Image: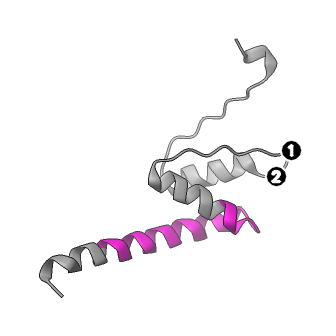
Amino acid sequence: MTAGSAAPEAEAARFQQQFAEAREAVGRVIVGQQRVVEAVLTAVFCGGNVLLEGVPGLGKTELVKALSRVLDLQFRRIQFTPDLMP
């Protein structure tokens, strides 16, 4: 093993730890949706996008609120109702 290969391994281990901590923190708020939490976290960390669809009451907004608190991000809710559409 070369000296240069330790840094990426340490960085990967640190990322895994941060991902696990974020997943656990969000999991305390969003119970029983581990796959959804992991998928959304993966998309956020990769710079991707997520479209959350579902009937009212499934916790979509609460999931995003929890993520914004855990990751120290800004949260703003926008309601796409027909009266707000162009």
> What are the residue bounds of the magenta stretch?
11-36
Horizontal and vertical percent for residue 10? Answer: 29, 77
Picture residue at 73% right of the left edge, 48% below the top: 60
14 left or right of 70 in image? left
Q: Amino acid at mark 1?
A: Val
Q: Label 2, label 1: how many angstroms apart (C-alpha)?
A: 7 Å
**Does the segment drawn in magenta span residue 18?**
yes
Horizontal and vertical percent for residue 19? Answer: 49, 68
Horizontal and vertical percent for residue 86? Answer: 70, 11
Say which residue label 1 marks.
Answer: 55
10 left or right of 83 in image? left
Say which residue label 2 marks.
Answer: 58
- Farthest-out residue, top: 86
The picture quadrant where one finds residue 51 is top right
* Element under disc 2: loop
The picture quadrant where one finds residue 25 is bottom right
Residue 36 disc label: none
Q: Nearer the viewer, residue 19 or 29?
A: 19
Q: For the residue carrying disc 2, how many other residues have a C-alpha within 10 Å: few (<14), some (14-19), or many (20+)?
A: few
Q: Amino acid at mark 2?
A: Leu
**Does the segment drawn in magenta span residue 35?**
yes
* Contact flag, marks 2 and 1 (Cβ < 8 Å): yes
